[in-house]
Amino acid sequence: MNRLGQIFPIYLVLLTLFFCFTVFALYVAQGENVVLKLVSPKEVLTTYDDMKAYGIVEEDLLVKVADEMNFDEVESSSYGAEFREKFLTKILANKELSSLFVQGAELAGEKIPENGKEEFFRKVVYPSSAFNVKDRVLEFRRGEVTKHLILESGQGNFPINFYYTFSRDLDFDLFTKKIILGDEL
């Protein structure tokens, strides 16, 4: 029998144990000096959840405005504009909701100032072309908005620029007050 064949497995076990011990010793030696290198996805997930909640409230407001509007006038050319005005009034009246949407939002690389929020909603988020009525169906389009977040690790040494762009298209039946076709929230 070959003695080398009997010693080699023992050598591999000892070498493996040595490397395991070395890794464990380095881990213990560094202890609390280890800097967090990972960036938490909490801000990204919070932004996504906020936009999902905004979409749910947006759908609820579409139903409320449709209830307030006179369905007999749905064929008039001004119905979409009237619907838009009532919808915008309700969105802007909810300060918490509109601030949540504007927080971190950018237009052409610039942050949206608090006093420019109404103009931002009227021209970018819900422009006049966003509410079209065809055959008792409201074609609703939310403009494209980009949110900019800076994600950092625990020590701030590793910032990541994160851009979250979102918009929404849906068709809303004004008679049944239900969404016929639409993007996911």
Image (cartoon, helix red, strand yellow):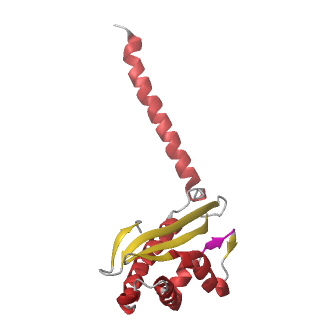
Could you tell whether 118 is left or right of 185 in the image?
right
Q: Using the rendered image of the protein, determine whether residue 153 is visible from the camera's viewpoint.
A: no
The residue sitting at 53% across, 68% down in the picture is: 43
Q: In the image, is residue 165 part of the stretch drawn in magenta?
A: no
Residue 54: percent from left, percent from top: 45, 77
Q: Using the rendered image of the protein, determine whether residue 139 is visible from the camera's viewpoint.
A: yes
| Front-lying residue, 35 or 19 | 35
Residue 52: percent from left, percent from top: 43, 72
Classified by dominant secondary structure, the portion drawn in magenta counts as strand
Could you tell whether 33 is left or right of 4 in the image?
right
| Part of the protein shown in magenta | 104-108
Instruction: Work out which residue is located at the far left of the displayed protein and give it.
Output: 176
The residue sitting at 38% across, 88% down in the picture is: 64
Q: In the image, is residue 105 part of the stretch drawn in magenta?
A: yes
Q: Residue 136 falls in which quadrant of the image?
A: bottom left
| Front-lying residue, 106 or 21 | 106
What quarter of the picture does the N terminus occupy?
A: top left
State whether residue 55 is above or below residue 37. Answer: below
State whether residue 125 is above or below residue 71. Answer: above
The residue sitting at 60% across, 75% down in the picture is: 124
What quarter of the picture does the C terminus occupy?
A: bottom left
The residue sitting at 33% across, 81% down in the picture is: 177
